[in-house]
Image: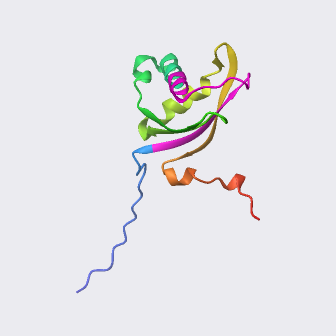
Amino acid sequence: EKEPAAYRRVVLKNASPYHYMKVRLVLEDESTKLSAVELKQFIVTGLNSLYGEAGAALTFDLLKYDEDTLTALLRVYSRGLVKLWSSLTLLGFYQKRACAFRVLQVSPFLLALTGNSRELHLD
């Protein structure tokens, strides 16, 4: 006799080893410009101040950076996403001037960050 078909539900959690973050740095003094190296060092400093040396050792990559808009695309291991996000949230001063990171988009898929439906303009 044939056995009845068995259905199995498979759910993949954190299928991607990385998460991608699109962030913008908002500075009180809009004339201040940061290079890519300065931005990465600023983020590492924030990780260090919140989580110590272990936090500063968190691996993340600055994939893309626009110096004009101060917008960056970061790649971080999924297990380090919460640490990176929280340290960005708590960074409040750059060179004794108020600043804030705005997290624009987060996704485990890089392709998802190429477009933003909130900024879509149809002709």
Residue 76's place in the image compared with 97, above or below, is below
Q: In which quarter of the image is residue 55?
A: top left
Which residue is rendered at x = 70% and y = 16% of the image?
97
Residue 18's place in the image compared with 25, above or below, is below
Q: Quadrant of the C terminus?
A: bottom right
Which sits in the foreground, 39 or 67?
A: 67
Which sits in the foreground, 105 or 37?
A: 37
Which residue is rendered at x = 53% and y = 25% of the image?
43
Residue 68 horizontal side relative to residue 82, left or right: right
Outermost residue toward the left in this view: 1
Q: Where is residue 22 in the image (x, y as percent from the top left)?
A: 58, 41
Q: Reply yes or no: does residue 50 show up in magenta.
A: no
Q: Quadrant of residue 103?
A: top right
How many numbered marks are there?
Answer: 0
Please name the colour scheme applied to the rendered image: rainbow
Q: Where is residue 75 in the image (x, y as percent from the top left)?
A: 47, 40
Which residue is rendered at x = 72% and y = 24% of the image?
31
Residue 100 horizontal side relative to residue 84, left or right: right
Q: Where is residue 77 in the image (x, y as percent from the top left)?
A: 42, 39
Which residue is rendered at x = 48% and y = 18% of the image?
48
Q: In which quarter of the image is residue 56?
A: top left
Residue 1's place in the image compared with 64, above or below, is below
Q: Reply yes or no: does residue 22 show up in magenta.
A: yes
Outermost residue toward the top in this view: 96
- The span shown in magenta is 19-42
